[in-house]
Each structure stands twice: as structure tokens, then as C-alpha cells.
Amino acid sequence: MVTCEVTTATPPSKHRTSTGSPDRVRGDATRFVRRDTVSDRFRKLLRKLNINGRPGLVFYTLRHVFQTIGGEAKDPEAVAAIMGHVDSSMGAVYRERISDERLRDVVETVRRWLWPDDTGGEEG
């Protein structure tokens, strides 16, 4: 298992991030890396597919939509679990698990919103 420590330093200018802040990762050897986040890749994909027609359409837009539409399932704990949010409420202290059925219900709610005419059967 390799562990990495992120430190700040002044790397060569070609390795500066888009915000101008230097990133440096130190593991077995010290080296500079370029940030290549999910958001960066998503933006490049939208640009390549020529479908980014509205300002503000970014990767986190998908998360916002999932949170909003998933909330229609009326199970905020399941939505939060799928999104990876930490629940620090008192109820979470006593909650041992969230069933797969509850998680599936949230995902199905979002799927039905995305593809309302889909019966869930496989194409063939």
C-alpha cells in the first residue's frame, strides 16, 4: 500500500494548477503532479462532445440533480449514503445500516425521472 502526502511547494510553472496554486505529492519519491480532477475531465468531455451549451454546467451539476431528484424517493438517509455524505445526526449513531432495497428505491426514482418510458427491461 502506497501512501501519499500532499504538500505545497513552488513547482516549475508548467506544473501549476489552473488556480495558480502549486501541488506537490510526496510518496516513495518526491515529484510534482498536475491536477486532473473529475471536474476537469467532465468539462473536457462536454467540450469534445459539443454539448456544454449552458454556463455553469459542470460535474457537480450531476450531484445536484441526483440530490434533488433522489429526494423525491422521500428517503434522505439513503440519498445521503449514495452520495457519500457523512450523517452526524443522533439517528445515525443508532442506525446500523441502510438496506439495499432503500438504496435501490432512490436509484430507481432517479432512473424513472431520466428515462420515464423505460420499463426497465433490457434492449434486445
Image (spheres, helix red, strand yellow):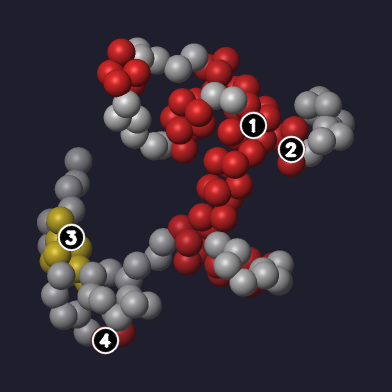
The label nearer to you, 2 versus 1, is 1
Q: Residues within 10 Å of mark 3 (few under 14, many from 20)?
A: few
Is mark 4 in CB contact (under 8 Å) with mark 2?
A: no
Three-letter residue code for mark 2: Trp
Is mark 2 in CB contact (under 8 Å) with mark 1?
A: yes
Three-letter residue code for mark 1: Glu
Which residue does the numbered mark 3 point to in the structure image? Answer: 6
Three-letter residue code for mark 4: Ser
Image: 15 above or below 94: below
The answer for how far apart the CA atoms under marks 3 and 1 are is 39 Å
Q: Earlier in the sequence, mark 4 or mark 3?
A: 3
Image: 10 above or below 7: below
Which structural element holds mark 2? helix
Q: Earlier in the sequence, mark 2 or mark 1?
A: 1
The label nearer to you, 3 versus 2, is 2
Mark sitting on residue 72: 1
The answer for how far apart the CA atoms under marks 2 and 1 are is 10 Å
- Percent position of residue 14, x then y: 31, 84
Three-letter residue code for mark 3: Val
Name which residue lies at 64% across and 39% down. Answer: 69
